[in-house]
Amino acid sequence: MRNIVIAFILVLVCHNSMAQKVVQGHISNEGLPLSGVHVINLSSAKKSFSNSEGFYTIVAAPKEELQFTYMGMDTVSIIVEDVTKTLNISMILRTEQLEEVVVSKKVNKQKELGMNYFSDPSIVNSFYGYLSPNTVAYQLKVIDGSEFNVGADILEAIASRRSGMRVKTILKGGIPTKVLYMRGMGSINNSRPAIFEVDGQVFQDAPVWIDLAMVLRVGIIPGIQAVVRYGPTASGGVVIINTKSGVHGLREENSGKLYDQARLRNNFVTGKVISNQDVSEGYPEYILEMEGTTTQNETLELYHKYERQFSNVPYFYVDSYALFFEKYGGAVADKIIEANFDAFENNAVWLKALAFTYESQSRFKQAHEIYKKVYTLRPDYAQSYMDLANSYRNVNRSESANSLLARHSFLLDEGLLVSDTLHLTEMMQREIDNLNWDNTKNSNQFETGTPQNEFSTRLVFEWNDSEAEFDLQFVNPNNQYFSWKHNLLEMADRVRSEKQLGYSMVDFLLDDELPGIWNVNTTYLGNKQLTPTYLKATIYKNYGSKFQTKEIKVFRLGMKGVNQRLFSFPVTSSIVQSK
């Protein structure tokens, strides 16, 4: 492992020493150019302003942050990546809210968190209301009870899940007493240990009597923020513990059942959802013309005609390859990529678009070679590890997949990669678990096809461009929906986390309580450029069972502002073997 660390440091030094480059773009509000927008590189302090037509240029390096400010508009912050050249910014008018409106929004947000408590493991219930890393302005760490090893000491278990925490035994009234110190606590200047809130009751002493098997959720609030809510006694931090004996999460009136986000009232799909056929009619002219040809020679003539116009444009080659593959097979289509691979070579965004396309065609060996290149280009991106590990799995090299994920965990432990406090950890753990299930399909525990979790379907979405903004809409058989909105306005913290940690994916788990045909729709909002985004959807059916299957679909997103159908899938009432 020492050699791995040395090699990894050398790679990071090379990547971090990349020369700064010019980032440019156009700034607007509701389609009209904004002049005089203040653009600053927060890392280097270099500044720029947009001109009378709304255009700007500024120098930045990967991982540096650009901030766009304009009087009366909401501030926009963007972390620059290795491929960032163009950032077109649409600024939004800042609205001042009346106090009663703010209070109303807080009440509604609390209700929403309470409804989502059992479906979102990042939410913890406190005396002061429901808390989530997505809704607080400080570093709240939430640990799901399933992450603890039953039978362990509760303080040691909590300390093991967060770096910088330690357990000590001190004399209190002459009696040896265990206490928990957070990072930076327990020093000469501050010797106060953490206090505890258990199901709404505050304790100065550690609740060592709690059985870990009874723990639902644990939340950890740092000392400075804890003092604001709990007073000076909380200067050592607060550990919030939700147990199965407490009352947590809101339930549906009358029935007492947990809220199902896809079955909430007044959330029926009423607007128009355009079909895949309607979307394809809005494709670029080169796709439409080549699709309309009847012979290979005719298609090639059109391809060469448009190649002069789109020379060295990666998405033109991705689209053309996919079209030729569908019409004439791989031998002809591969020549397009082979002749123009220089357009992809050092750009992870377009390499991923190509890899997605290969995977959707079950050409896993070709995709694997691409993912290896992406991993080389982005060794500090968590997504690189997950993509390459899944690719190893697709080419039947599960041991290499396990080794790669173990390397990622090691680098996290060594502090060479940024660790996650929000969403990534849970998704990566599900990837590891599913890899392990896949490796043990022939063991006795899978003989009956019994799933290893309570969900029957898992949907994983990944997008090639981290600047992409879009909404996902999940529609159940009753035509009711719930939405996930991936944009700077709705999910600023999430988008920032994605950039810092290097991932561009999300997953959703569905149980079998509402069987029937489900639909997935999306509304594309753009990617701050004039290029398309490629969205990959992986559909796991009979998830976690012996009969698990996987299907990969890829969608070209270019038409903005319309709700478009992506795909439909069945949810069955029991685990069934695919034919």
Image (spheres, grey):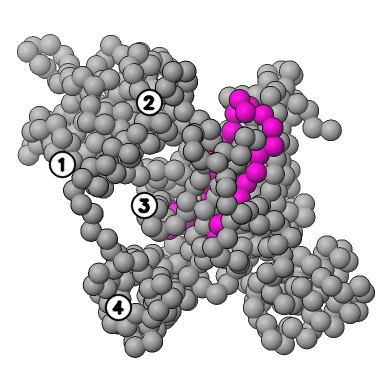
Q: Amino acid at mark 4?
A: Val
SS at mark 1 in the image: helix
Q: Amino acid at mark 2?
A: Gly
Instruction: Locate residue 293 relative to residue 178 in the image: left or right.
Output: right
Instruction: Locate residue 105 relative to residue 118 in the image: left or right.
Output: left
Report the residue marked by disc 1: 224
Report the residue marked by disc 2: 249
Q: Amino acid at mark 1?
A: Ile
Which residue is depicted at the point 44% across and 24% down? 252
Which quadrant of the structure image shows residue 372?
A: bottom right
Whichever of labels 3 and 1 marks the residue nearer the N terminus, that label is: 1
- Mark 4: few/some/many CA within 10 Å (<14, 14-19, 20+): many
Residue contact at pointers 1 and 4, CB within 8 angstroms: no
Whichever of labels 3 and 4 marks the residue nearer the N terminus, that label is: 4
Q: Amino acid at mark 3?
A: Asp
Q: Nearer the viewer, mark 1 or mark 4?
A: 4
Whichever of labels 1 and 2 marks the residue nearer the N terminus, that label is: 1
